[in-house]
Amino acid sequence: MSENLGQKSPKKRKPSFVYAILSITLILFVVGLVGLGYYYSEKGLKSIKESIEMEVILHADLEKKQIDETSYFLKNLEGIKDSKFISKEDALKDFSKELGQNIGEIAGENPLYDAFVIHLKSNHSNKDSIQNIVGKLKNYETILEVDYSKDILDLVSISLQRAPIIIGIFCILLLFIAFFLIDNTIRLMMFSQRFLIRSMQLIGATKGFIMKPFLIRAIISGIISAILAISIWSILLYLGYFKFSFNYTSNDLVIFGIGASCLVVFGILVSILSTYLSVNKYLRLKLDELY
């Protein structure tokens, strides 16, 4: 009978370690997805902010030199991402094409003006920055007026300012949930080792000697779990590129690399912390409390 018990005990320990790794892998994978979702939501919000157009209308009969100077002014003005010049002739062609008739012939002349279409940088797409930029534009000598939808810009800037805060709070909550799930998984695994810990303590093993193998296993489990989670994550990114034609920039790849490193660090730190607290708990418990 003692032989049977001796044969069964190792089989009970191995699955617990494997199950812990699989559980931590799943949790880290979810954490990675949340981080990826946050990154792309921020990227999407930035794209929306920078897609809003403002039309800078110029005075009539300006010389090419003055238009070039205006273009240089816009490119160097803080808060402006890019600018594109649209001549009044090109604007008339586009406008006539949209209406299906020649506006120049109807009006007898070209009623439009030369203009620049500009996009603002995402961190300047707020009410105060917009007012400051518009004020500088209107004071420039070659600019007649600045045309933009004030209500839409205000609505977008207010809405998009709140979105990162909400997404950030959601991600932090999920991070805490992930921490507690990993902590509980490791505590359950350590629960099956409580008598082993007590046996080592009874034969005179020091706290450091008892801790060492469990902490080493925690580091190994954290690394393996993180690698598995990153592997699944990489497969999804690979499928996204080849199956769904997602385009990844060099900046995206850098962010993915940083995120993968953070997953490894997070997995190791949580595993070590949870293991240390669990072993320390069973070292302090009385024999009767272990049952």
Image (cartoon, rainbow, N blue to C red):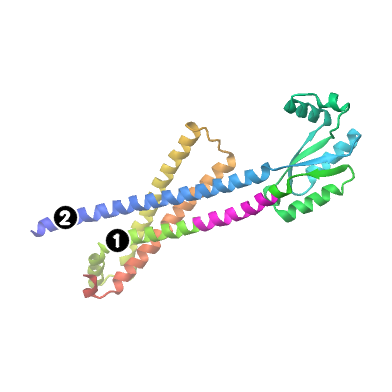
Q: Is residue 82 left or right of residue 226?
A: right
Residue drawn at the location 60% of the way across and 55% of the way down: 162
- The vertical placement of 55 against 262, above or below, is above
- Quarter of the view holding residue 89: top right
The residue mark sitting in front, 1 or 2, is 1
- The vertical placement of 56 against 278, above or below, is above
Q: Nearer the viewer, residue 43 or 287?
A: 43
Query: Is residue 77 inside the magenta stretch?
Result: no
Say the numbered circle drawn on residue 8.
2
Q: Which residues are magenta?
A: 153-170
Spot the residue most to the front.
Answer: 106
Task: State how far apart marks 1 and 2 are (Cα).
Answer: 19 Å
Q: Is residue 212 left or right of residue 15?
A: right
Give the residue number, with chain letter if any, for mark 1.
Answer: 188
Q: Is residue 201 left or right of residue 28?
A: left
Looking at the picture, which amino acid does disc 1 mark? Leu
Q: Nearer the viewer, residue 131 or 109?
A: 109
Secondary structure beneath label 1: helix
